[in-house]
Image (cartoon, rainbow, N blue to C red):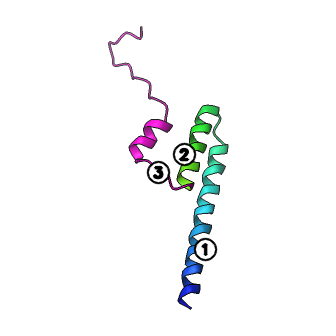
Amino acid sequence: MANLTKAAEDNESKIDIDHKLEVATTFIDRVGDPGAKDRLNSAAAMKALGMEATPETMVNRLLPEQAKEIEPGDSPC
């Protein structure tokens, strides 16, 4: 009986992981920028394969560099 319970819990976990990946790829499919879409799909695949990086690394790799805000008095050129 314990083996059945363990197997059921494992299957439930796998189903949950599959559902989360499906939700993530649905959101990724809505991204218009092909480069960003490719990076996000790569990150989702890595996570699905258990190859995770720190959140800081993921942010630095996935999000484009933010444009520097021009302070009052700065010249844009």
Query: What kind of element bears circle 3?
Result: loop
Q: Position of residue 10 (x, y in %)?
A: 56, 74
Mark 2 Cα shell of 10 Å, populated few (<14), some (14-19), many (≥20):
some
- State whether residue 38 is above or below residue 53: above
The segment highlighted magenta reads 49-77
Horizontal side of residue 65 vs 49, given as left or right: left
Residue at the outermost bottom position? 1
Where on the picture, by quarter, is residue 42? top right
Would you say residue 60 is visible in this rendering?
yes
The mark that comes first in sequence, 2 or 3, is 2
* Residue beneath the point at 59% across and 66% down: 16
* Residue beneath the point at 47% across and 51% down: 52
The mark that comes first in sequence, 3 or 1, is 1
Magenta: main secondary structure: loop
Task: Check disc 2 and give the amino acid type.
Answer: Ala
Query: What kind of element bears circle 2?
Result: helix
Q: Which mark is residue 52?
A: 3
Please tell me which residue lies in front, 69 or 45: 45
Q: Which mark is residue 1?
A: none
Q: Position of residue 4 (x, y in %)?
A: 59, 86
Give the alpha-carbon distance from disc 2 to disc 1, as whole Å: 24 Å
Q: Which mark is residue 43?
A: 2
Give the alpha-carbon distance from disc 3 to disc 1, as whole Å: 22 Å
- Is residue 47 rendered magenta in the image? no
* Residue beneath the point at 54% across and 81% down: 6
Please tell me which residue lies in front, 44 or 30: 44
The residue beneath circle 1 is: 11
